[in-house]
Amino acid sequence: MPQYKIAIVGAGPAGYFTAQALQNSQSDELSFSIDMFERLPTMWGLVRSGVAPDHPKIKTVAKVFEKVASEPNFRLFGNVEIGTDIDIEELCARYDAVVMCTGSAIGKKLGIPGEDLPGSLSAAEFVPWYNGHPDFASLDVPLDGTTAVVIGAGNVAMDCARILAIDPSELDSTDTATAALEALHTSSIRKVYIAGRRGPEHAAFTAPELRDLPKLEHTDVVISKEEVEAAHIRAEAAGEIEKHLASNLEAWRLIAEHPHSGHDREMEFHFLAAPKEFKGDGKIEEVVFGINEIRDGKVVDTGKTYSIKANLVISAIGYEAAHINGIYFHNGKIDNEEGRVLGTNIYTVGWAKRGPSGVIGTNKSDASDVVKLLISDLPEQARPDCDITTFIPAGIQIVDQASWTKINAAEVAAGEALGKPRLKETSIEKLLEMGK
Ligand SMILES: Cc1cc2nc3c(=O)[nH]c(=O)nc-3n(C[C@H](O)[C@H](O)[C@H](O)COP(=O)(O)OP(=O)(O)OC[C@H]3O[C@@H](n4cnc5c(N)ncnc54)[C@H](O)[C@@H]3O)c2cc1C
C-alpha cells in the first residue's frame, strides 16, 4: 500500500483540519505521513494570536488540533519558515503534495493621507500585540489619549474596539499578553468609536457578537435609535430581509434601547462614515470622515465631513496574504483554483486560499474539499522516503511535537498559578528554551 508524504505549511486551523481530513481519508488502500511546518515555535495560528482573549471558549478547538497531532502519522516542524528556511521547490520535490495553510496576516491599507502617522495601526498589528505574537511584542500602542477610533465593520474591528473599551480588569483572568495587559491597565482611553462606511444593515458583525455588547459590565455601548430605525427602513425597502440580517437588526435595536449606566467607558458606532484623512503633527491627532448617505441602495459621498480628535486609530478593513518566496499570489490570496495551484503539486486551504473570511469551522469544510481534490490527483506511486531534516539549515532548533507539548504545558502551568488559562511567552528565544 503506498504511503503518500504530505507537507502542510502553517499550523493554524486550516493546517490542522487538513491533517485531520487526510487522517480521516486513510483506508486499506491509502495512507499518509504528514509533516507540518510552522514558522513560529508556537502553534494554532490565529486561535492563539487572533481570537480575542475574552472569548476563551472558542480556543478550546485547540484540543481537536492536539488530538490530530497525537496520531502516529503526524510530525511537527515548528520554528521552520517555508520559503526562507526551506525552499518551496525542495518541499515539492520531496512530498507528494504540499498544502499551503499560511493564512492572511497583512492588514489592508486605507490608502488615505496620514495613514502612516505614528498612532495609526492595523488590526494585523494590534491584535497580535495583545495576543502575544512574538513579532509584535514590542509594538508601540499609544494609549495616553482619551479617544481611539477603530475603522471597520466586522468582528475583527469589534474585537479591537472591545479590548480598548472594556475595563482591563476584565482581561486579568485571560491569556492576554502580559506587556499588553499592563499597558491596557495604564490606558487613558475612555471613548472608542467604531466607524463603518456603509449602514448598520451592511455591517459584517455577526449577531452573537452584537448581542454580547449590552452585557459589557463597565462599558456603555452607543448607537443612535434613529440610525437603527433608518437601517431597518432601508433594509425593508431593499426587499426581503434575510435571517442573519433580521437577527443583526434586532441586535442593533437591543443595543440602541439598552439603558446606559453612566460608565466613563463608552464604545460608539458611527455608520456612513468614510475615513478621508488622518491629521496630526508627527502623530495622529484627528480623523476626518466623509459623510456618506444611501441613495437607491448605493453608498454615496455627500461631500460633507466631520472630525474626531483621537491619538490612536486602528484600521480593521481586511487582510491579505504575506508574500512567500516561490508562491504566486493574486488579489491577496495564493493564486489557486478551488485549492489547486495549477501545474504544481501545491494546494492551499484556509485564509491563504479564500482570503480573510469565515470562522474557524469554515476551514474544516474547506480542508475536506481540498483533500478530496488532492487525493484524486495523487499519482500511483508515492515518492521515496527522504529525511527532510537534512534540508533544514544547521542552527535552526526544530520545535517538534514533544517540544511544543513542553512549551504548551509550561505556559498553562505558569498561567494556572495566576488564575489564567495560560501565561504566554512572547520571546522566541525563551520559547525555544522552554521547549528543550
Ligand atoms: C482578530 C481575529 C479574531 C478572530 N476571531 C474568531 C473567533 O472568535 N471565532 C472564529 O471562529 N474565528 C475567528 N477568527 C477567524 C479564524 O481565526 C480564521 O478562520 C482561521 O484562523 C484561519 O485559519 P488559517 O489556518 O487559514 O490561518 P491562520 O490561523 O492565520 O494560520 C496560519 C499559520 O501559518 C503560519 N505561517 C505563515 N507563513 C508561514 C511560512 N512561510 N512557513 C511556515 N508557517 C507559516 C502562521 O504563523 C500561522 O500559524 C478570527 C480572526 C481574526 C483575525
Image (tube, rainbow, N blue to C red):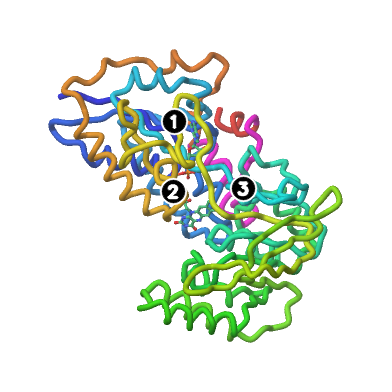
Task: Estimate the x, y position of residue 106 in percent, counting from the top left.
Answer: 57, 42
Amino acid type, residue under disc 2 in the picture: Ala
Disc 2 packing (10 Å; few <14; some 14–19; many ≥20): some
Q: Could you tell me how far apart the alpha carbons at marks 3 and 1 are, in whole angstroms?
A: 21 Å
- Number of the label disc, if any, that sits on residue 366: none
* Magenta span contains residue 427: yes
**Which kind of residue does numbered mark 3 sit on?**
Lys
Q: Which residues are magenta?
A: 405-429
Q: CA distance from mark 1 to mark 2?
A: 30 Å
- Mark 3 or mark 1: which comes first in sequence? 3
Q: Is residue 119 left or right of residue 68?
A: right
Q: Position of residue 218 (x, y in %)?
A: 68, 74
Image quadrant holding the N terminus, namely: top left
SS for callout 1? loop
Residue designated by label 1: 328
Residue at the (44%, 30%) spot, across then down: 328
Q: Secondary structure at mark 2?
A: helix
Membership of 237 in magenta stretch: no
- Looking at mark 2, is its residue's CB closer than 8 Å to ligand 1? no
Which disc, if any, is residue 62?
A: 2
Residue for point 32% across, 44% down: 367
Position in image of residue 118 (x %, y %): 77, 47
**Relative to residue 321, is residue 388 drawn left or right?**
left
Q: Earlier in the sequence, mark 1 or mark 2?
A: 2
Q: Position of residue 176 (x, y in %)?
A: 63, 53
The residue positioned farthest toward the right in the image shown: 281
Callout in the foreground (1, 2): 1
Q: Is residue 187 left or right of residue 405?
A: right
Q: Which disc is residue 109 wearing?
A: 3
- Left or right: where does residue 53 sit relative to residue 89? right
Distance from disc 2 to disc 3, alpha carbons, whole Å, reads 31 Å
